[in-house]
Amino acid sequence: MSKKRKAGKRGRKAFSLPLLTVDSVLFTYHEKSLKVLLVQRSSEPETGKWGLPGGIVDIETDKDIESTALRKLVEKTSVEPPFFDQLESIGNQTRDPRGWSVTVVYTALIAHQNCEQHVSTVSDVQWFEIEEALKMKLAFDHRNIVLSARERMRQRALYSILPGYALAEKFTLSELQHLHELLIGKSIQKRSFRRRIEQAELLVDTGEKRQEGGRPAALYRLKNVSMTHRFVRNLEAS
Amino acid sequence: MSKKRKAGKRGRKAFSLPLLTVDSVLFTYHEKSLKVLLVQRSSEPETGKWGLPGGIVDIETDKDIESTALRKLVEKTSVEPPFFDQLESIGNQTRDPRGWSVTVVYTALIAHQNCEQHVSTVSDVQWFEIEEALKMKLAFDHRNIVLSARERMRQRALYSILPGYALAEKFTLSELQHLHELLIGKSIQKRSFRRRIEQAELLVDTGEKRQEGGRPAALYRLKNVSMTHRFVRNLEAS
DNA sequence: CTTCTTAGTGACAATTAGACACTAAGAAGT
DNA sequence: ACTTCTTAGTGTCTAATTGTCACTAAGAAG
């Protein structure tokens, strides 16, 4: 093992390089369920299958891999998600039938209403309820990626209020709690949840109310409007 | 934006691809301090500077990117670390003077004694106290990578006992606590620390003792001997 | 003005974490 | 032998956090 090539040590053309792609797992919350954005592939390989929004990194135009991932997402939804951060990278010989490939995966969150206008007008981009998505035969290893992304979001539902980025700008605490319950997979004590929210001091009471059957609920919004992955770590503990 | 190339849509040769590398931040604990393994570069670019152990992914021989990273580590230390998992990926136009490049970064932990034999015999591989390493002018963006890796380890010191993989097979609770204190940056209450350890049930009392000035301390070892990144998540909560 | 529904709070119990003094077990000096 | 020094490990009280659940609040609908 560990033989070095004799030639081309500094000329990169001498190496054969793997295909480099990005993929994003974009979540939203709509109609009491957690949804993930999938795109139907129009080109080889895996044509026709649904997969994650993403594509090949274009080193001519993209400054960095985040830009690539964001660009691909904007192409599909027409808007930039307010929350976006790196999940993991997967690179091996078997995940793409074309051979060696590497994908850098991001998770993103967006309010359903903020991209529904665009998503509903095209047929190859669609929100899927997460359980449905996991039952489908997705392209490449995208099913596993969705599983990882959900697990990451589950952790965040336990220790942060970042899932709030999947809600509309103004939301009620009950909505946020229900979303957290979906992610964690079990119900949360209302009192504990609200205490945690309060201590985090990351929500602002807008003063407005919204009614939905019973007593009107206060509408809150997140203090930090937009969140790129560089800032995520600081808020994780909250 | 988002123009598609007209040709070569399915032939990958039509794309110019970024350089793909891996880097590892290998930590150990030795002589009451946290150390990181650095390698002095022998080739262009950045010749002579110290940087992280890593290198270009070889798609001819490596099955996946983890193998590449492990292979590079083994080349430098002659042993596989018992703890190894992915940290993040960085890809942009500016990090390597040769142009667009992407690196997938791993963090790893190993007992100092398990690789000292090999490391001490070569001059281009060396352990550096982490504060020293951060004062140096490292190659590429490796200083930032070391900072990220330390921050990740800091989180782990707070919520898990994974840092134990940086210790010898058998270690005392005082050693483990001191390591955690180094990572967190402040002292920990002995009683709280030990309670946490006990509840995690991830340590085994070997029955042996070791003396170091005062009362002999019980020697423990980790229940899970080796830990690749696939299994890390399950233990994080402990 | 009663009932239904969802929002939000009060208050006590149970659990966990912090603080710190205390006991334990050895080495080394007198 | 006994005192002192050093580090290991525990007992125990207090403080803080979290869980539980019943209660009050504010509207709609009948």
Image (spheres, coloured by chain):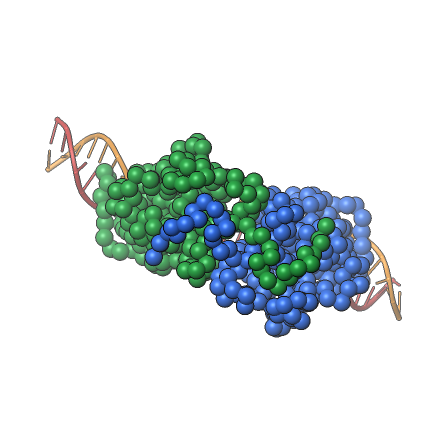
Chain colours: A blue, B green, C red, D orange
For residue B234, say whether it is visible. no
Please indicate whether residue A174 sits to the left or right of residue B76 in the image. Answer: right
For residue B92, say whether it is visible. yes
Residue drawn at x 71%, y 54% as measured from the top left:
B3
Q: From what the image shows, is residue A49 above or below residue B109? A: below
In front: A172, or C21?
Answer: A172
Residue drawn at x 28%, y 49% as measured from the top left:
B114
Please indicate whether residue A116 sits to the left or right of residue A154 in the image. Answer: right
Q: Position of residue B181 (x, y in %)?
A: 41, 40
Q: From what the image shows, is residue A61 above or below residue B232? A: above
In front: A59, or B70?
Answer: A59
Query: What is the quadrant of residue D30 in the picture?
Result: bottom right
Q: Position of residue C19 (x, y in %)?
A: 43, 38
Query: What is the quadrant of residue B48 in the picture?
Result: top left
Q: Position of residue B87 (x, y in %)?
A: 49, 50
Q: Position of residue B39 (x, y in %)?
A: 37, 41
In front: B64, or A99?
Answer: A99
Please indicate whether residue B20 sits to the left or right of residue A153 in the image. Answer: left
Residue lying at the far front of the rendered structure: A7
Residue drawn at x 55%, y 50% as measured from the top left:
B18
Query: What is the quadrant of residue B125 in the picture?
Result: top left
Residue drawn at x 58%, y 52% as measured from the top left:
B16
Please indicate whether residue B208 sits to the left or right of residue D15 in the image. Answer: left
Q: Quadrant of the N terminus of chain A?
A: bottom left
